[in-house]
Image (cartoon, helix red, strand yellow):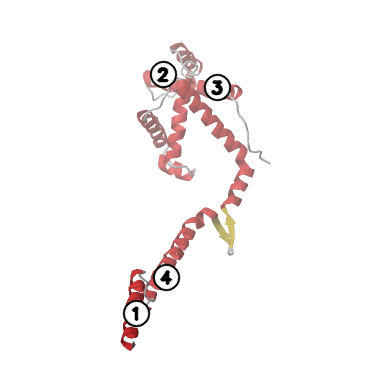
Amino acid sequence: MATIRKTTRARKTVKVASIVSEKNISKPLTSSALSTGLSRRTIIIALVVAAVIIVGVLLRNQIIVATVNGKPISRLALISELERQSGKKTLDVLITKNLIFQDAEKKNITVSDKDISIETKKIEDNLKKQGQELNTLLTSQGMSQSEFKEQIKIQILVKKLLVKETAVSDKEINDYIAKNKDAMPKDLSEKQLKEEVKGQLEQQKLSEASNKFVTSLREKAKIEHLLNFK
């Protein structure tokens, strides 16, 4: 009987061991495993903190534009003040530029890089005659090269849009020279003088025609102001 009981107990022990093995009960975590898990978590936290700091530094200038005795001036405050001082005027300029671009696109009138280069060269030559440099002038006015090129592009577009209105005839040139003979420069040839006068007359006509042109564009356009300036 004793032998039978021992055999039965042995069988039960084997069966239980087999069940435990089949269920794949996990072993308790060792100290090394816990250490590895904690180190990974620490690294992740450190990376997140570093990322937050970097983003904060990068965005600081986007949020704060200056400090006065440690007190910050926000970008929003700057924008609000600029809007208050010259917001309406700036918006009108943007509206006018958009109207000109839209009208030129509708009439398939474009400006090439070559057009801009030629006009820029003319301006540079005129400035050099006056002892000035274009880059120095732009810096003094706080204007970038891209802003300057955009202005040149708009001027050329307007000239092309108003080419008929600004055309100057030979009769107009000769009449102007005859009326202002005493005031004409003496160091220019006849051809140079006529070119100079033609440029002046074209500029006068362009100034008058462009004002009427912009006024006409604004009257025809549907402009809705969504921001009220105080």
Residue 13 is tagged as 1
Q: Earlier in the sequence, mark 4 or mark 3?
A: 4
Distance (Cα) linking label 1 and label 4: 44 Å
Q: Earlier in the sequence, mark 4 or mark 2?
A: 4
CB within 8 Å, label 1 to label 4:
no
Q: Earlier in the sequence, mark 1 or mark 2?
A: 1
> Foreground mark, 1 or 2?
1
What amino acid type is highlighted by mark number 1?
A: Thr
CB within 8 Å, label 4 to label 2:
no
User: Element at badge 3?
Assistant: helix
What amino acid type is highlighted by mark number 2?
A: Lys
User: Element at badge 4?
Assistant: helix
Q: Which residue is mark 2?
A: 194
Distance (Cα) linking label 4 and label 2: 81 Å
Q: Which residue is mark 4?
A: 42
CB within 8 Å, label 4 to label 3:
no
Distance (Cα) linking label 3 and label 1: 103 Å
Residue 168 screen position, x and y as percent: 46, 16
Residue 225 screen position, x and y as percent: 63, 33
Q: Is residue 21 left or right of residue 88?
A: left
Tell me if residue 132 can be seen: no
